[in-house]
């Protein structure tokens, strides 16, 4: 019995002695810390609400334990940065232990306070480490920008939370002086009009969007040099091409003579780019989309339901589901467009382009409706073997035609169908670099010169870049430029 007791005492003494030895910290002034970076930079952060976080690894690559006497922000309590080490937040830490060949994990956060500036501004600080008399610093830099905040404050059962930004009989203009940051939905009410002027940037928080209620009107009036941009509110470089950051632009039926229009816009990184939907009453005015890029959405680029739409010089690209789903019937004309779907973020089982003439009303009743579609001088291609499907009920009057276009489809005997006229089938359009969203045509593209000049008149004499098409237009939104 005593023999076992003495063995236990010896083991405990050895263990306690080892722990005590491990708690010894070197005071050698030649020992220094290592860091995962010497500068932590933050991209643009919106003021007031905006904040962003980066992480920093702190390494002790020495064979002896160290005690960091001080970790602090040079700006102290006035700093717009804050730090969190091992779950504790603050701006000044002392006697932080870091064992030999071990590390600490730190978060650095910046929150930009509001001020009078409209243009981006710069803030900086330093994170200071003092160990055994050695001082080491990490630079902290951030760009901030003031913004107009749209915060949802109303809720109607069955609809998302919203804030009315253009009330009935109001015409409201959003300008480029400051970006707009939308939490929830920005709502255009019936008989209200929202005009978004050139150069304006609209940023949506997660789940947010823009909503034109029945008989409201949206007018996006960008220009070639200053397009209107719709995207998420995370501006760090990591989120530049990250889809699914916000919800959608949702357009219900407009009133006659006051249709929605989107000109020179970039709509990126959401769930659905544009949802155009007849919901309460028959649609009396078309949606006009011109010189617009709709790309990188987890759901669909364009989702239409019993709508009247015309799209020209428009790119719809890189969507996790359909690039365009035109459902429930309606009238659609697409000229000089590029539909390109090379989605790789997940498995896509749907085609790029889908037609359907079955409408479901708000009461759940379904019935077939008339469907008309015409695509001229366009490209419809992607990484699926078949990029075009239909699902028509026989009761509706359905007509669809592709003219002078490049199409990827597995339909047999295509040449005998009156639906296809002077089209090129299943040939790679040879975009310059679809992985970087560059859908200009390369030198050997089979889309060059296949367009019909009858479909490239008026505003379509010029492509999305403003290049003249002349008498030999190419298919797609971009005209090939030799030696570009």
Image (cartoon, rainbow, N blue to C red):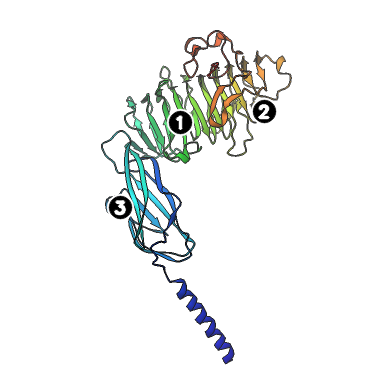
User: Tags 3 and 2 in contact by the CB under 8 Å rule?
Assistant: no
State the quadrant of the N terminus: bottom right
Q: Secondary structure at mark 2?
A: loop
Relative placement, left or right, of 469 versus 427 is left
Could you tell which of marks 1 and 2 lies nearer the N-terminus? 1
- Report whether residue 475 is seen: yes
Give the tally of numbered discs.
3
* Separation of residues labelled 1 and 2 (CA atoms): 28 Å
Write the residue at 39% across / 56% down.
84
- Position of 376 with respect to 466 (left or right) is right
Q: Please report contact status of discs 1 and 3: CB closer than 8 Å, yes or no.
A: no
Residue matched to label 1: 249
Q: Residue at x 58, y 90 (%)?
A: 3
Expressed as whole percent of the image width and height from the top left, the position of residue 269 reads 49, 35
Which secondary structure, mark 1? strand
Which sits in the foreground, 279 or 132?
A: 132
Residue nearest the observer in this picture, 229 or 395 = 229
The part of the image, by quadrant, that contains residue 94 is: bottom left
Q: Nearer the viewer, mark 1 or mark 3?
A: 3
3D distance between C-alphas at marks 1 and 3: 44 Å
Q: Could one spot residue 323 in this view of the protein?
A: no
The mark closer to the camera, 3 or 2, is 3
Q: Quadrant of residue 121?
A: top left
Q: From this view, report whether residue 206 is shown above or below residue 290.
A: below
Percent x, y of residue 24: 43, 71
Q: In this figure, which residue is indicated by the disc labeled 2?
A: 386
**Furthest-bottom residue in this view:** 2
Q: Is disc 1 surrounded by few (<14), some (14 to 19) or many (20+) residues within 10 Å? A: many
Among numbered discs 1 and 3, the one appearing first in the sequence: 3
Q: Which residue is mark 3?
A: 74
Crowding near the residue tagged with mark 2, few <14, some 14–19, many ≥20 C-alpha atoms within 10 Å: some
């Amino acid at each position: 019995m005593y023999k076992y007791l003495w063995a236990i005492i010896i083991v405990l003494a050895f263990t306690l002695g080892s722990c005590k030895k491990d708690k010894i910290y070197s005071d050698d002034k030649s020992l220094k810390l290592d860091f995962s970076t010497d500068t932590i930079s933050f991209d643009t952060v919106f003021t007031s609400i905006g904040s962003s976080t980066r992480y920093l690894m702190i390494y002790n690559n020495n064979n002896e334990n160290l005690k960091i006497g001080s970790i602090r922000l040079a700006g102290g309590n006035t700093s717009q940065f804050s730090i969190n080490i091992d779950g504790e937040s603050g701006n000044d830490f002392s006697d932080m232990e870091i064992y030999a060949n071990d590390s600490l994990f730190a978060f650095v956060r910046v929150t930009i306070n509001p001020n009078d500036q409209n243009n981006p501004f710069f803030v900086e600080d330093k994170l200071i480490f003092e160990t055994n008399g050695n001082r080491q610093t990490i630079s902290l830099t951030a760009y901030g920008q003031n913004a107009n905040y749209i915060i949802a404050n109303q809720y109607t059962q069955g609809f998302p939370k919203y804030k009315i930004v253009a009330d009935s009989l109001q015409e409201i203009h959003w300008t480029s002086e400051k970006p707009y940051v939308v939490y929830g939905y920005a709502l255009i009410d019936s008989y209200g009009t929202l005009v978004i002027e050139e150069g304006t940037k609209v940023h949506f928080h997660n789940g947010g969007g823009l909503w034109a209620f029945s008989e409201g009107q949206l007018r996006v009036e960008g220009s070639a040099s200053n397009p209107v941009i719709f995207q998420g509110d995370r501006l760090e470089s990591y989120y530049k091409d990250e889809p699914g950051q916000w919800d959608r632009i949702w357009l219900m039926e407009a009133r006659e003579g006051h249709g929605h229009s989107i000109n020179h816009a970039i709509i990126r990184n959401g769930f659905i780019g544009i949802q155009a939907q007849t919901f309460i009453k028959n649609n009396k005015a078309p949606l006009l989309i011109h010189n617009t890029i709709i790309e990188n959405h987890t759901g669909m680029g364009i989702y239409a339901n019993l709508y009247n739409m015309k799209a020209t010089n428009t790119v719809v690209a890189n969507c996790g589901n359909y690039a365009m789903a035109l459902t429930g019937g309606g009238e659609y004309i697409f000229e000089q467009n590029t539909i390109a779907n090379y989605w790789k973020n997940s498995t896509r089982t749907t085609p790029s382009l889908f037609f359907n003439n079955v409408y479901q009303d708000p009461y759940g009743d379904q019935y077939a409706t008339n469907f008309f579609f015409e695509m001229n001088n366009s490209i419809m291609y992607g990484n699926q073997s078949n990029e075009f499907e239909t699902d028509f009920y026989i009761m509706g009057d359905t007509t669809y035609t592709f003219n002078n276009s490049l199409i990827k489809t597995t339909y047999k005997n295509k040449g005998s169908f009156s639906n296809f006229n002077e089209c090129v089938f299943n040939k790679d359009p040879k975009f310059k670099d679809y992985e970087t969203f560059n859908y200009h045509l390369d030198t050997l593209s089979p889309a060059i010169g296949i367009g019909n000049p009858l479909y490239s008149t008026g505003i379509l004499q010029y492509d999305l870049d403003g290049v003249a098409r002349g008498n030999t237009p190419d298919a797609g939104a971009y005209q090939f430029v030799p030696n570009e």
